[in-house]
Amino acid sequence: MTTIKATCPTCGDIDLKPRDIHVVVAPAAGWATYSFVCPSCEDDVTKSADDEVVTLLRGAGVTVERVHVPAEALELHLGPPIDADDLIDFGLTLAAADALVEVLSAESAGR
């Protein structure tokens, strides 16, 4: 069986089997990672992987998982993230919209 050498940040060089490594590739997002649990210290280790590393791991028998990243996740987002005040304002706006819908519905029913 194939033995794959990897490096744990705590333990240094370790030997793994293909089944011990998990590779995830997101082509649209332009990234790939491989991860494993160190057999010595049991830490979860995740590292980025370029195309060459993915090809080598695939060739060694590691299963590669391809994930689809929605286009919305890749869009450029400008401005600060929303906060609790933004959520409160949104809730108040929805409540006001519900009241407006009730008024307009009552007016159109009275026609």
Image (cartoon, helix red, strand yellow):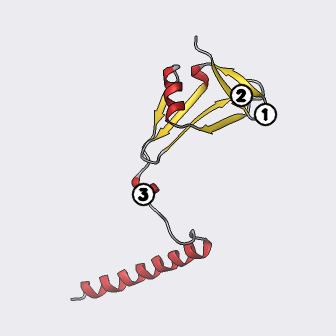
Left or right? Give the position of 103 relative to 42. left
Task: Name the mark nearer the viewer: 3 or 1.
Answer: 1
| Badge number at residue 38 | 2
* Residue 31 percent coordinates (x, y): 51, 44
Residue at mark 1: 10
Label 2 is placed on what type of residue? Cys
Mark 2 is surrounded, within 10 Å at the Cα level, by few (under 14), some (14 to 19) or many (20 or more) other residues, namely: many
| Mark 1–mark 2 distance (CA, rounded to whole Å) | 9 Å
At horizontal 47% and vertical 79% (from top left) the residue drawn is 93
SS assignment at label 3: helix
**Marks 3 and 2, how far apart at CA:** 35 Å
Q: Can you say whether 29 is above or below 79 in the image? A: above
Q: Is residue 102 left or right of residue 47?
A: left
Q: CA distance from mark 3 to mark 1?
A: 37 Å
Q: Relative to residue 6, is residue 80 drawn left or right?
A: left
Identified at 42% across, 82% down, the residue is 99
The numbered mark, 3 or 1, whose residue comes first in the sequence reads 1
Quadrant, the N terminus: top right
> Do the residues bearing badges 1 and 2 touch, measured as CB atoms within 8 Å?
yes
Q: Which residue is mark 3?
A: 72
Above or below for 101 versus 57: below
Residue 36: image location, x then y, percent: 64, 30
**Where residue 44 appears, x then y in whole percent?**
69, 35
| 17 vs 83, nearest the viewer | 17
Viewer-proximal residue, 80 or 53?
53
Identified by mark 3, the residue type is: Glu
